[in-house]
Image (cartoon, rainbow, N blue to C red):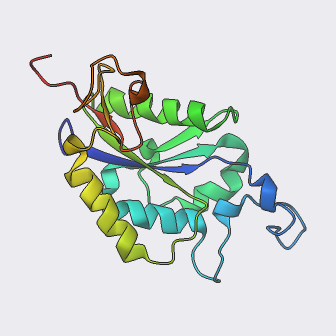
Amino acid sequence: MNGIGSDWAVVLAAGEGTRLAALTRDAAGNAVPKQFCSLNGGRALVQEAVERARRVVALDRTCAIVAQQHSQHWRKALRCLPAENIIVQPQNRGTANGVLLCVLSILERDPLARIIFLPADHFVLDESALERSLRELLANRHHNPATTTRRDGRCNGYGPRTRPACGGQFGAAGVLPAPADG
């Protein structure tokens, strides 16, 4: 690892893909979650998401959350990731629980980690625009109170420290450490 307090990325790939199940079937007619399918005959959406994450975060700090029951799909699709960076949900309990599992896993290894989350089932038309936005988000995460909260639950930036709109321990931009002065 490259030290404590590094930027991390998590690819959210544990969904069932039920909304498109009728369209995402293998040759035998079995439903395949959409994140393990390709829209253009190339790489699967999950592989595109991992590559997206790797453009802004080092490979050893790129993780994926997957569902145990989809192992026949993710084992091959995610072989580029270190084994310890594939976080397996034993049972699907929804996105919030999957995010929490990722946060806990990463914080064990890097207690001051800053984490961004990327969906594995989205098609991105302008990859360079998204990459620029992610880089800007990571570079400016300390300056935007609307997207981040401190690990101690207090807001970064404007408003009273108890403002409920801050939303808890981590925000869309990821987990930020509380300053040393508390």
In this rendering, is residue 129 above or below 102? below
Residue 164 lies left or right of residue 158; in this view the side is: right
Q: Nearer the viewer, residue 156 or 169?
A: 156
How many numbered discs, if any?
A: 0
Query: In the rendered image, is residue 62 in sight?
Result: yes
In this rendering, is residue 78 above or below 176? below
Name the image quarter holding residue 162: top left
User: Which residue appears at 68% of the width and 69% of the height?
Assistant: 37
User: Which residue appears at 20% of the width and 41% of the height?
Assistant: 142
Q: Residue 54: image x %, image y %?
A: 35, 62
Q: Residue 136: image x %, image y %?
A: 25, 59
Residue 33 lies left or right of residue 40; in this view the side is: right
Q: Nearer the viewer, residue 106 or 75?
A: 106
Q: Residue 122: image x %, image y %?
A: 58, 64
Residue 20 lies left or right of residue 10; in this view the side is: right
User: Which residue appears at 68% of the width and 48% of the height?
Assistant: 15
Residue 23 lies left or right of residue 126; in this view the side is: right
